[in-house]
Image (cartoon, helix red, strand yellow):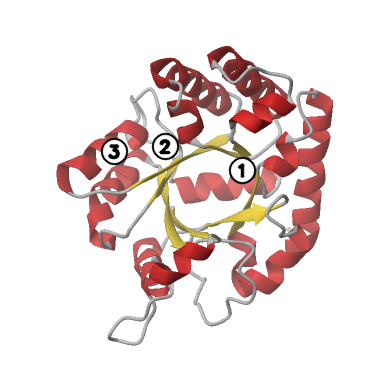
Amino acid sequence: MSPLEPFGARLRHAMDARGPLCVGIDPHGSLLSAWGLNDDVAGLERFTRTVVDALAGTVAVFKPQSAFFERFGSRGIAVLEQAVADLRDAGALVVMDAKRGDIGSTMAAYAETYLRKDSPLFSDALTVSPYLGYGSLKPAVDLARESGAGLFVLALTSNPEGAEVQRAVREDGRTIGATMLAHLAEDNAGQSPMGSFGAVVGATLGDLSSYDLDINGPLLAPGIGAQGATPADLPAVFGPAVRNVVPNVSRGVLRHGPDAAALREAAERYADEVRAAVGA
């Protein structure tokens, strides 16, 4: 298979062409119920197919949450595999939200699952947890580079519990979250138009001016919509790095289903609001 253009470059082109928006695909039971679907594999497949058919041709990035597919076992994973293939065939980028993190051969196996180009679950990028040490991610970093894929590393997450780890201060006076951002900046050095190794930074966190978010890479920003943040909040949170923000909206779009036109309208509205806020 021919090598892909690096993820950072493909992401920049996709956001410029389709708008800077990532739509989460989170088929949890309450959302299936709200759509009038059963909480079973048939409901999962109908939900996923509806989202893909409605949005795959216009939204830049999708973030399927693997756990909501895994809970149905192999049949749920099969739905996820098909969705990933269909989204990518339609020209969208897929960020697999699996938050994998381990050491050695186990981390390498996770990387092969999502970042090896001939894998059924090959995705353009993968969310990973660095809290066994950033160096534990090396197998994923290496394979992502080889495959033209990317990573999104948990750095400053929006859940309140995250602060006890991410804002803990090291002996050198730097927080753990800042340390992860520094590692990412190093891995992205010299890449244009931006690197392929991004950070997950919550859009609900308020003023982050004490952190250097200019990592020359993308910043995946959950929290827009149902969690309370709005596109207008992005410049205040991300400052000069706002151009590289990939805002993620899940329920804010998905709650408008199962009507395909309503899903498209919601996604377009968010994309327009983000463009206006970040000057894209």
Q: Which mark is residue 4?
A: 2
What type is the residue that disc 2 sits on?
Leu
Q: Crowding near pointer 3: few (<14 within 10 Å), some, many (20+)?
A: many
Reading the chain from its start, which is encountered first: label 2 or label 3? Answer: 2
Q: State yes or no: discs 2 and 3 in contact (Cβ < 8 Å).
A: no
Image quadrant holding the C terminus, namely bottom right
* The image quarter in which residue 257 lies: top right
Residue 5 placement, left or right of 263: left
What type is the residue that disc 1 sits on?
Ala
- In whole angstroms, how far apart are the C-alphas of marks 2 and 1? 14 Å
Residue 37 placement, left or right of 176: right
Q: Secondary structure at mark 2?
A: loop
* Residue at the image position 75 percent from the left and 35 percent from the top: 255
The residue under label 3 is 110
- In whole angstroms, how far apart are the C-alphas of marks 2 and 3? 20 Å
Q: Position of residue 268 (x, y in %)?
A: 79, 41
Reading the chain from its start, which is encountered first: label 3 or label 1? Answer: 1
